[in-house]
């Protein structure tokens, strides 16, 4: 009987000790983050929660690392930010004053649909979301950017230039579902159909065939009916490249489009300087006439 009573008291003590800890383990709190400038991406313990000037709820109680990221600015990192949990816990306020980056580059990437994983030189940076994925503190120069998403064809662009001190934008990337994506087999030709293989400098350009989007360079389009096709290759920041290709049964036509950057807008000459000469000449003529009249 004494053993049973002792065992019961031990069990009660265990419940008294463990139940509050178990209840506290599931508590969550909130963090409010503002930034200057805004918007910027906010990560709590490595998880993207949204963009600045918002409050973020359902943050597990405990200490976290908060990162604020905006392209063209240095990352803001706050470690050991304690978030209290429970219904009566206060929201933790945070403010990030972002510093402009003069020696490093920034990049903003968005896609349709959202949720694509973004890699820069094979380094994972996050997933695309509303407002664009903000990437900061990149080295300046040329990079290879890759977007991947389950059920969609990967998108890759090479020689993408990111100048120091600026944020560049890789936007309007339309991912093509695998069900409709053009396969890229080794093309050997066919006796009844033809194929076109297209590449571009730089790569990652949009390819349209007879005004229908077919994918991104480098790209092979097989099983084409013999005939003529209007080909349009385009990429943001570059002049569109267009041609007409004629293919016969069994042909495998290869074409590379060299894209030229869009020229800078010419600076309009100022007209103020041009008007000085005739005005000055008029003053001299008037002065001459006055002197003649007096004489």
Image: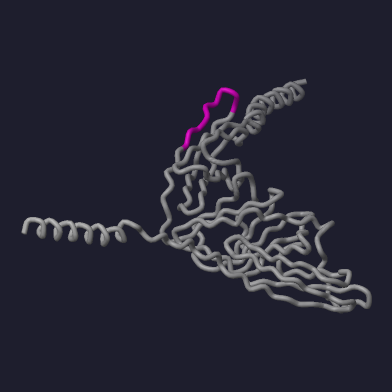
Q: Quadrant of the N terminus?
A: top right
Name the residue located 43 percent from the left edge and 47 percent from the top edge.
98
1 in the magenta segment: no
Q: Position of residue 122 (x, y in %)?
A: 63, 64
At horizontal 59% and vertical 26% (from top left) the residue drawn is 86
Report x, y in % for residue 117: 67, 55
Task: Give the image quarter of residue 277.
Answer: bottom left
Magenta-highlighted stretch: main secondary structure? loop
From the viewer's side, name the closer residue of 2 and 273: 273
Which residue is situated farthest in the left direction here? 295
Q: Which residues are magenta?
A: 86-94
Q: Nearer the viewer, residue 57 or 197?
A: 197
- Which residue is pictured at 27% across the width and 60% down the height? 278
Q: Is residue 91 magenta?
A: yes
Q: Nearer the viewer, residue 66 or 81?
A: 66
Instruction: Please state if 244 lies on the left or on the right of 292 as rendered.
Output: right
114 is higher (above) or lower (below) than 241? above
């Amino acid at each position: 009987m004494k053993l049973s009573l002792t065992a019961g008291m031990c069990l009660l003590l265990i419940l008294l000790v463990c139940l509050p800890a178990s209840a506290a383990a599931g508590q969550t709190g909130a963090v409010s983050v503002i930034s200057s400038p805004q918007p910027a991406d906010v990560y709590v313990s490595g998880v993207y929660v949204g963009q600045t000037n918002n409050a973020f709820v359902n943050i597990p109680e405990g200490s976290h690392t908060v990162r604020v990221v905006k392209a063209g600015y240095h990352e803001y990192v706050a470690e050991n930010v304690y978030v209290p949990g429970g219904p009566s816990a206060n929201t933790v306020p945070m403010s990030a004053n972002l510093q402009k980056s003069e020696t490093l580059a920034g990049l903003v990437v968005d896609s349709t649909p959202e949720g694509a994983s973004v890699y820069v030189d094979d380094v994972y940076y996050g997933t695309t979301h509303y407002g664009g994925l903000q990437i900061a503190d990149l080295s300046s120069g040329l990079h290879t950017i890759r977007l991947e998403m389950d059920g969609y064809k990967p998108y890759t662009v090479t020689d993408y230039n990111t100048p120091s001190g600026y944020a560049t934008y890789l936007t309007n990337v339309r991912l093509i579902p695998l069900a409709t994506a053009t396969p890229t087999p080794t093309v050997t030709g066919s006796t009844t159909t033809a194929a076109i293989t297209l590449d571009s400098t730089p790569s990652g350009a949009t390819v349209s065939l007879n005004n229908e989007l077919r994918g991104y360079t480098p790209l092979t389009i097989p099983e084409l009916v013999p005939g003529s096709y209007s080909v349009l290759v385009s990429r943001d920041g570059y002049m569109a490249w267009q041609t007409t290709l004629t293919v016969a049964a069994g042909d495998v036509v290869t074409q590379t489009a060299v894209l030229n950057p869009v020229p800078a807008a010419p600076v309009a000459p100022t007209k103020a300087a041009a008007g000085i000469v005739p005005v000055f000449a008029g003053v001299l003529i008037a002065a001459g006439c006055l002197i003649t009249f007096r004489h």
